[in-house]
Amino acid sequence: MLDSRLSAVADLVRSGTRFADVGTDHAYLPAFLLMGGKIEYAVCSDLRKGPLKNAEETVKKYGVSDKVDLRLSDGLDAYSDGEVNEIAIAGMGGLLISEFIERTEWLRNDDIHLIMQPMTHAEDLRKTLYENGFYINKEIAVKDGDKLYIILSAYFGGISETRTVSECVIGEIYKNTDSVSKEYLESILKKYIVKYEMLKKAGKDYHETESIVKELRQCLK
């Protein structure tokens, strides 16, 4: 029912929590969690009516519609404080997820667990989390076919931090020893090597990018 990416997200969900799936699309993740008894109910939201219609069909198909609340919502705007404490935001860009975090004040609660799978700009999402008092307790790299994904698990700790660009690019994934995490870091390294070479060739400031390349290579030793 779930691909490798969403299976990894599901593994991080705490049992018995009040679950929200933001940008639910087909609602496969909450349906899977409900069928397995990991959660008792879910709030599923999406910005568009089409995906919510798909979600409605999924929860009916798997017999869990009585345990799901479907909502039209831009991010977490249609949620209220204290309603959920386990929040999955998967398949969106890191900049968009960052916007949700910055404008949703009630997320600043140490009981709330954020599980985020940014499709792009993971470094910007990490920066937003650090600066807004969240800490990343775990990162997981997942491979599905020939695509690599990163999943971040975070809680609010109340301490705002300013991290270096390199720290935001690398995150916590360097602590992992599995082969997929290494492959993920190697893919990021390749990206920054290309950026470094382009900047140097164009006569632009490449020193920050060069520093990132060096730190990535150090992590991969």
Image (spheres, rainbow, N blue to C red):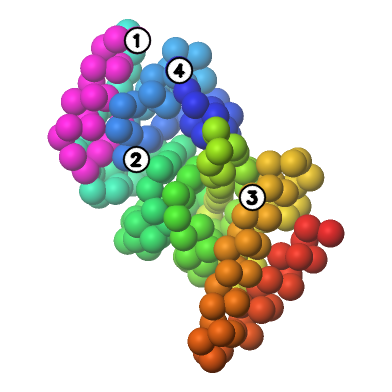
Point out residue 39 in the picture as x, y percentages from the top left corner: 46, 22
Cα separation, mark 2 vs mark 4, equals: 19 Å
Residue underneath mark 4: 1
Q: Quadrant of residue 136?
A: bottom right
> Which mark is on residue 62?
1
Residue underneath mark 3: 184
Point out residue 161 in the picture as x, y percentages from the top left corner: 58, 71
**Quarter of the image containing the C terminus?**
bottom right
The residue range painted magenta reads 44-62
Instruction: Name which residue lies at 54% across and 78% down.
Output: 198
- The amino acid type, in three-letter code, at marker 2 is Val
Instruction: Name which residue lies at 76% across and 65% down.
Output: 217
Cα separation, mark 4 vs mark 3, equals: 25 Å
Q: Nearer the viewer, mark 2 or mark 3?
A: 3
- The amino acid type, in three-letter code, at marker 1 is Tyr
Query: Which element is circle 4 on?
Result: loop
Q: Nearer the viewer, mark 4 or mark 3?
A: 3
Q: Quadrant of residue 1?
A: top left
**Is label 4 in contact with label 3 (beta carbons under 8 Å)?**
no
Residue 141 within the magenta-colored segment of the rendering: no
Residue 145 in the image: above or below residue 111: above
Cα separation, mark 1 vs mark 4, equals: 11 Å
Residue sticking out furthest to the left: 49
Q: Nearer the viewer, mark 2 or mark 4?
A: 4
Q: Seen in the image, is 193 located left or right of residue 68?
A: right
Cα separation, mark 1 vs mark 2, equals: 20 Å
Please say whether residue 188 is visible from this viewpoint.
yes
- The amino acid type, in three-letter code, at marker 3 is Tyr
Q: Earlier in the sequence, mark 1 or mark 4?
A: 4
